[in-house]
Image: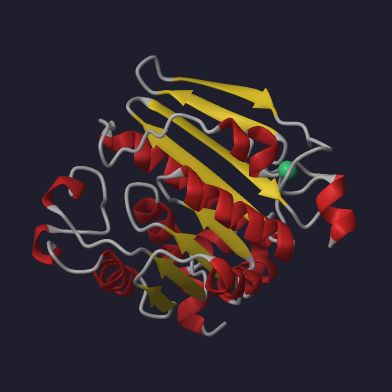
Amino acid sequence: MNDEQLLRYSRHILLSQVGIEGQERVLGARALVIGAGGLGSPAALYLAAAGVGHITLVDGDSVDLTNLQRQILHTPATIGRPKVESGRETLARFNAEVEIVTVERRIEGEALDGLVSRADVVLDCSDNFPTRHAINRACVRAAKPLVSGAAIRFDGQVSVFDLRERANPCYACLFPETAVPEEERCAVMGVFAPLTGIIGTIQAAEALKLLIGAGESLTGRLLLLDALAMRFREVRIRKDAACEACGSAVVSAS
Ligand SMILES: [Zn+2]
């Protein structure tokens, strides 16, 4: 780190759990942020401000007037432009040292596997179950830590699926793909603006802790927020041996 970086990140370096070593890990890290909307906006902003060296931002949508109520990467000036471009410009204004790679489409298959395998941490800031399950499978295959968030109406949830360890549960252990949960997207449902900020910011916090190797992550715990009552609660997530994404049948077959 040069003198300017030592100053810029001094309030992190002063934390004994981070220090120079931890901040250097952050500066050298690669984060994959899938979704540049309500969750991806605060998540990517905090990762960039904290100095995460490489951020890949993935989103196939363009900025719409209805996004601005909560998607703080975007402004009235970027309406109609791809969210990843709008996001890259905003992030670069916060921290020009961060390398930002943009992918302007919904990714799946081999392209998704490639992006996940190059990342140190993956943030699922998407808004639909098929994408969530595709990201989870790619993280299982590449044994990468996944930080998953969701926000709808006044309800938020966030967890970490640290798939570097085979014993840890994955997203599909919690929400099996076959269960076909009712599709609820904030693209069509209401969502309380700061709720996406709270959940996305928790995702950034968990991602940074994983990169630094500090503290205890949300692995095996689903954190639920009722923003109307402003109450957090927590439920245990157990690994499902019969899970179609990470279970013993999948592992022995591969
Ligand atoms: Zn699983």
Q: Residue at x 53, y 33 (%)?
A: 180
Q: Residue 233: name its quadrant.
A: top right
Q: Residue at x 85, y 48 (%)?
A: 249
Residue 198 is left or right of residue 72, and the answer is right
User: In this view of the protein, can residue 15 be seen by the observer?
Assistant: no
Q: Residue at x 32, y 52 (%)?
A: 37
**Image position, residue 110 (x, y; %):** 58, 73
Residue at the right extreme of this rendering: 252
**Image position, residue 41 (x, y; %):** 34, 55
From the viewer's side, name the closer residue of 191 and 41. 191
From the viewer's side, name the closer residue of 117 and 252. 252
Q: Residue 170: name its quadrant.
A: top right
Residue 220 is left or right of residue 153, and the answer is right
Quadrant containing the N terminus is bottom right
Residue at the bottom extreme of this rendering: 2
Q: Is residue 91 above or below residue 35?
A: below
Residue at the top extreme of this rendering: 229
Q: Is residue 207 above or below residue 55?
A: above
Q: Is residue 63 above or below residue 229?
A: below
User: In this view of the protein, can residue 232 be seen by the observer?
Assistant: yes
**Image position, residue 155 (x, y; %):** 41, 26
**Image position, residue 96 (x, y; %):** 36, 79
Q: Residue at x 66, y 64 (%)?
A: 19
Q: Residue 237: name its quadrant.
A: top right
Q: Quadrant of ligand 1?
A: top right
From the viewer's side, name the closer residue of 100 and 215. 100
